[in-house]
Image (cartoon, rainbow, N blue to C red):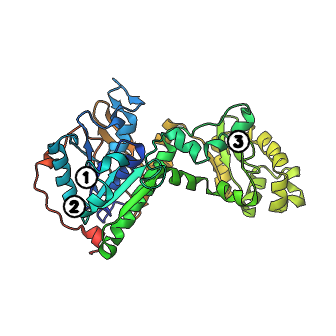
Amino acid sequence: MPERVLPPPLAGVTVVEISHSVAAAYAGRLLATLGAETVMVEPPDGSPLRREPPFLPPANAASALFAFLGSGKQSVVCDLATASGRAALANLLATADVFIHDIPVAQRATLQLDEDSLRHRYPNLIDVSVLPFGAHGPKADWQGEEINLIHASGEGFLLPNGLSVELFPDRPPLKVHGHFASYQGGVVAALGALSALMSRDHVGAESVDVSVHDAMLAVGAFALQRFGDGSLEHRSTRSFKYGGVLECADGYVELLTLEDRQWRGLVELMGQPRWALDPALSDSLERSRRGEEINTDIRAWARQQCVGDVVARAQALGVPMAKYNSPAEVLAGKHENARELFQQVDVPGAGRLPILAAPFHLDGAPLALKAGPPQLGEHQQLLKETRRHERPAAVMGAS
């Protein structure tokens, strides 16, 4: 694995984060992993994310969710209900490049953290607001939990689908496990911050308004597009015409063959069965029309296969197929370890644990976490330091 030669792209960038939600915290986490100094401003009792389950052994002292979202960040405590706390935050913002927050719209003016106040007081500060339905419009004051955002975006209406809905046709709509919508919002917020950083020298500091709902809507863009021709997708019909999740003798795989060459590879993988050699199936439209029939045969074949063997043979033939791994298998995976996706960090209360650094590489090398999640107020000295602000070379484009 090549070592990183260049500094991380956001070296020298300072991010101040106030996050109660996964979306805002994940945006800060992405920027921290890209090299920014990300300072979490927490209330005296700590971020509510520190109290989110599941909790890590041995004594349930640490939130697994916070361990991931907080890694690479610093923590200071500011009680924004007090004048001294608001003054401490103001000092941080005066030397920051980006402010990521999910403060409710109704509370912002009182704290002088509304868009107009921020622009007047900190003209070089990029303000990134991350709320369930955005900070503008008729739903700006609406609250929304993960389940609300999944269903408000229409995604919940489409789940489960494919093999799951066939196996359990009577089950109601489901929420995607975990914080799927919130992570989509966090990615959009991080990209908005990066775009604003890149253009700041040309157009000045900008405000970025992120709606997690809008970000989640984009995930189901194809389903929304089909409204135009009068089609309404449903979880019982939303699936690949053939392929999708397949049960094997010792686990599950996912198969997707969109191209003719992939179909030909699948036929070879299956040993060229007579039904698959029907000349009519060389036409992708005919395969779509006969998808249910094809899937019956594919599934019967798959149940006789062992996952490791069939996936290796499929990938050698250019057939898009992959195994559904358990968490332990992901941590032990050759691919994941070759790419150094996980790094060992210290998690207070839980010891040294592997944490996902970033799901991507830059310059052909993995990004590094600076540290594990901070203890509450661990970097309180930042509030006492006289901080000078110099525009970072990475943002200014200097060599």
Can the viewer see residue 359?
no
Dividing the picture into quadrants, the one containing residue 289 is: bottom right
Sequence order check, earlier mark of 2 and 1: 1
Residue identifier under label 1: 112
Residue 49's place in the image compared with 141, above or below, is: above
Decide if residue 173 is on the left or right side of residue 395: right
Decide if residue 394 is on the left or right side of residue 144: left
- In the rendering, at what x and y percent does residue 238 appear? 71, 47
Look at label 1 and name its amino acid. Gln
Residue identifier under label 2: 121
Which residue is drawn at the image coordinates 72% and 62% (left, top)?
259
Which residue is drawn at the image coordinates 69% and 37% (left, top)?
164
Q: State which quarter of the image contains the N terminus.
A: bottom left
Cα separation, mark 3 vs mark 1, equals 55 Å
Look at label 3 and name its amino acid. Leu
Cα separation, mark 2 vs mark 3, equals 57 Å
Q: Residues within 10 Å of mark 3 (few under 14, many from 20)?
A: many
- In-front residue for pair 218/329: 218
Q: Are marks 2 and 1 in contact (CB under 8 Å)?
A: yes
- In the rendering, at what x and y percent does residue 149 appear? 53, 44
- Mark nearer the viewer, 3 or 1: 1
Cα separation, mark 2 vs mark 1, equals 9 Å
Can the viewer see residue 326?
yes
Dividing the picture into quadrants, the one containing residue 360 is: bottom left
Decide if residue 275 is on the left or right side of residue 56: right
Q: Residues within 10 Å of mark 1 (few under 14, many from 20)?
A: some
Sequence order check, earlier mark of 2 and 3: 2
Which residue is drawn at the image coordinates 73% and 51% (left, top)?
232
Residue identifier under label 3: 246
- In-front residue for pair 6/12: 12
